[in-house]
């Protein structure tokens, strides 16, 4: 399991290779990855990019805790999260999540769970830039609803 937070761009292939290399002993049958990118618009129209701020130490700890929860809930054999911070241009990579599990359902659900919960429980704050000015972005209702779906489920791991 690994977590990285920082301003540098990442290679999806290198992260996939890292995830699988450290998982080789488990012989997982499923690997799922997700990469989030900066959109060039919001509800009001065109934006010029975003800026992400975080709380060093606390953010990494929250991501590690989230990985631990996902591992227990979905019987993961390995997982990783990489999140960028700082000023990011439109279409830049923001976040990468990778999960390994014996079965695809756990791997897919864990990746979805990690992204939904990350947006609600990890201290990372976003500004959007438009017309040369930045504006803080409030939490979206849809993000809260996505996280609540996981909190309300009572299914057994791997079900």
Image (spheres, rainbow, N blue to C red):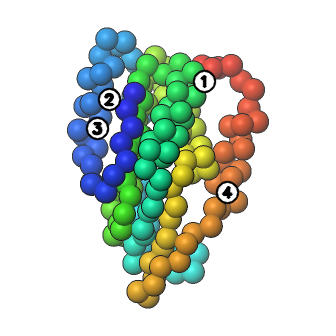
What residue lies at 23% left-to-right and 38% top-to-bottom? 14
Residue closest to the eye, 56 or 120: 56
What residue lies at 46% left-to-right and 56% top-to-bottom? 54
Q: Is residue 101 left or right of residue 23?
A: right
Q: Position of residue 47 (x, y in %)?
A: 45, 78
Q: CA distance from mark 1 to mark 2?
A: 19 Å
Q: Is residue 82 left or right of residue 135?
A: left
Q: Is residue 52 left or right of residue 154?
A: left
What residue lies at 63% left-to-right and 62% top-to-bottom? 139
Residue, disc 4: 142
Tell me the mark number nearer the camera, choosing from 1 and 4.
1
SS for dot 2: helix
SS for dot 4: helix
Residue, disc 2: 19
Residue, disc 3: 15
Q: Position of residue 158 (x, y in %)?
A: 60, 19
Q: CA distance from mark 1 to mark 4?
A: 23 Å
Between disc 1 and disc 4, whose residue precedes?
Answer: 1
Identity of the residue furthest to the bottom in this view? 131
SS for dot 3: helix
Q: Is residue 130 above or below residue 103?
A: below
């Amino acid at each position: 399991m690994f977590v990285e937070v920082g301003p540098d761009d990442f290679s999806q292939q290198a992260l996939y290779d890292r995830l699988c290399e450290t998982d080789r002993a488990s012989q997982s049958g499923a690997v799922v990855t997700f990469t989030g990118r900066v959109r060039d618009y919001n509800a009001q129209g065109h934006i010029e990019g975003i800026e992400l701020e975080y709380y060093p130490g606390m953010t990494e700890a929250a991501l590690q805790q989230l990985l631990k929860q996902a591992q227990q809930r979905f019987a993961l054999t390995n997982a990783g999260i990489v999140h960028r911070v700082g000023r990011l241009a439109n279409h830049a990579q923001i976040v990468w999540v990778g999960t390994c599990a014996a079965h695809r359902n756990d791997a897919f659900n864990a990746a979805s769970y990690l992204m939904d919960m990350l947006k609600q429980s990890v201290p990372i704050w976003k500004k959007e830039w438009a017309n040369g000015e930045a504006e803080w972005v409030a939490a979206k209702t849809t993000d809260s609803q996505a996280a609540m779906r996981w909190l309300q489920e009572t299914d057994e791991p791997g079900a």
